[in-house]
Each structure stands twice: as C-alpha cells, then as structure tokens.
Image (tube, rainbow, N blue to C red):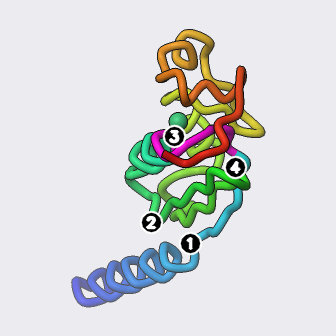
Amino acid sequence: MKTKFFITMLAATLSVSVYAQSNIVTASVKVYGNCSMCKKRIETALDHKGIKQAQWNAKTKQLDVVYNSSKITEQQIHEIVAKVGHDTDKVKAKDETYASLPFCCLYRDHEMKDDH
Ligand SMILES: [Cu+2]
C-alpha cells in the first residue's frame, strides 16, 4: 500500500515536470520606447520569475520574450512593462509613471532616433 502511494507520487511528480517543460512560450510583443535607457529599463523589469529571456529592440519596438506559461501569463508581462512606464499594445502605462521617465525616454511625445 505504501509502495503504491510512493509510485503514484513519483508519477505525479514526473508528469508535473514534463508539463512544466512543455510550457515554454516565445512571444513577440509591441512595446513603446525610445532609447538604450528604455531598453535597459524594460529588460531589467523583465528579469522576473517565469521569464527566461527578454530582448527589446529600440528600432522595431518589438519585445521578444521567452517565458514559462505555467509561471507567468502574457498579460502579466504586459503589466510588468507598463508598470515601469512603457506602453504595450495591450496595457498602457500610468500617466504619472510615464511622466517620471527621463526626457529622452518620453516616447509618447517625441521619437529619439539615435541610440545613446
Ligand atoms: Cu529611453
């Protein structure tokens, strides 16, 4: 009886780890920003549990993110980015958060072409 319980637990543990491995998702998200400071801000914010990799491109405004969908949702990723002041195609940053960004990062008001 005890052995049977142990085997059941082992099977359950194994299926959970297999399940977790199959939940790696790659997504491409539009995130608005201007410069290398924005890039650092966005990528640092996404140094977060469940997120394996995050890379934002200042030219294309495209965020490529690899995450574990059993630990974090795409919606949460949008919210993390918006929380540090960057609009996404789904979630907008709060006006006061946006206003506290450095001048060069104010992507709603002007576009910064050069990467500094
Ligand atoms: Cu910036």
- Mark 2–mark 4 CB contact (< 8 Å): no
Q: Earlier in the sequence, mark 2 or mark 1?
A: 1
Q: Is residue 63 above or below residue 33?
A: below
Category of crowding for the residue at label 4, using alpha-carbon neighbours closer than 10 angstroms: few (below 14), some (14–19), many (at least 20): some
Q: Amino acid at mark 3?
A: Cys
From the top left corner, tell me how far across and down residue 36 is, in percent. Answer: 49, 46
- Mark 2–mark 1 CB contact (< 8 Å): yes
- Mark 1–mark 4 CB contact (< 8 Å): no
Q: Amino acid at mark 2?
A: Lys
**Residue that appears at 57% across and 19% down:** 98
Category of crowding for the residue at label 1, using alpha-carbon neighbours closer than 10 angstroms: few (below 14), some (14–19), many (at least 20): some
**Left or right relative to 62: residue 42:** left
Dot 2 corresponds to which residue? 52
From the top left corner, tell me how far across and down residue 58 is, in percent. Answer: 62, 50
The magenta-colored residue range is: 31-38
SS at badge 4: loop
Dot 3 corresponds to which residue? 38
Alpha carbon of mark 2 to alpha carbon of mark 4: how far? 20 Å
Alpha carbon of mark 3 to alpha carbon of mark 1: how far? 26 Å
**Residue that appears at 48% across and 15% down:** 100
In the foreground, 55 or 70: 55
- Mark 4–mark 3 CB contact (< 8 Å): no
Dot 1 corresponds to which residue? 24
From the top left corner, tell me how far across and down residue 28 is, in percent. Answer: 70, 60
Q: Nearer the viewer, mark 1 or mark 4?
A: 4
- Mark 3–mark 1 CB contact (< 8 Å): no
